Image: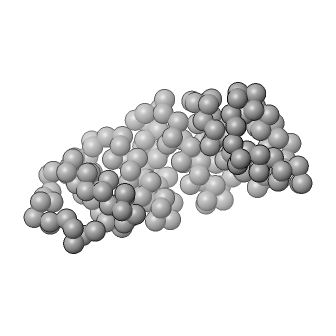
């Protein structure tokens, strides 16, 4: 991606432009370049805001740099506490790092923030399955179904929970 972007246009102090280059890099699945642009944007404008932290956290998540992802998703939660996605993604980062109790906490917070967030129910079921708590996973399934949430992933997790 670097060859497509003229370096003369990327000047420090142009936080929004760096952020946009980061978005382009993300869309191109070039997470290393995306990280560099998002970091440059934050360095140019330390108060760059929610979306810059969110994109940087997502990039770190993709790069398997979970500690950095954790920090920036946490910043996002502080900046936008009524938005479920950072809580959900932070739960996924914790799940990947095998911090199951933290994962459960953040995914549950995402569900409380947005009760119709279907992917969060799927992830919470996965956490309970990984913890060896099939009854809790089944309870989550029943809650999701009672809210009209349908997905093949929910059904697949129910089958797994029933086998435990």
Q: Residue furthest right?
A: 163
Horizontal and vertical percent position of residue 43: 24, 54
Task: Tell me the quadrant of the picture where the N terminus can be found.
Answer: bottom left
Asked whether the viewer can see residue 39, the reply is no
Horizontal and vertical percent position of residue 27: 37, 57
How many numbered discs, if any?
0
Q: Is residue 69 above or below residue 87?
A: below
Q: Is residue 87 left or right of residue 8?
A: right
Q: Looking at the image, which is closer to me, 103 or 116?
A: 116
Horizontal and vertical percent position of residue 116: 62, 31
Give the colour scheme of this rendering: one colour
- Residue in the picture at 31% in, 66% down: 33
Q: Is residue 134 left or right of residue 95?
A: right
Q: Quadrant of residue 163?
A: bottom right
- Residue in the picture at 25% in, 51% down: 20
Q: Is residue 92 left or right of residue 21?
A: right
Horizontal and vertical percent position of residue 66: 51, 60
Q: Residue furthest left?
A: 8
- Residue in the picture at 47% in, 38% down: 77
Task: Tell me the quadrant of the picture where the C terminus can be found.
Answer: bottom right
Q: Is residue 80 above or below residue 95?
A: above
Asked whether the viewer can see residue 60, the reply is yes
Q: Is residue 82 left or right of residue 142?
A: left
Q: Quadrant of residue 75?
A: top left
Q: Is residue 128 above or below residue 113?
A: below
């Amino acid at each position: 991606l670097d060859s497509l972007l003229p370096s003369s246009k990327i000047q420090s102090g142009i936080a929004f432009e760096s952020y946009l280059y980061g978005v382009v890099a993300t869309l191109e699945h070039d997470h290393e370049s995306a990280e560099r642009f998002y970091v440059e944007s934050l360095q140019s404008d330390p108060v760059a805001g929610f979306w810059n932290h969110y994109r940087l956290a997502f990039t770190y998540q993709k790069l398997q740099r979970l500690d950095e992802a954790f920090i920036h998703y946490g910043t996002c939660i502080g900046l936008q506490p009524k938005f479920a996605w950072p809580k959900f993604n932070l739960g996924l980062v914790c799940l990947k790092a095998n911090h199951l109790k933290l994962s459960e906490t953040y995914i549950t917070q995402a569900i409380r923030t947005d009760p119709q967030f279907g992917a969060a129910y799927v992830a919470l079921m996965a956490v309970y399955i990984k913890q060896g708590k099939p009854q809790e996973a089944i309870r989550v399934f029943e809650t999701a179904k009672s809210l009209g949430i349908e997905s093949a992933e929910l059904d697949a997790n129910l089958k797994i929970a029933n086998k435990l």
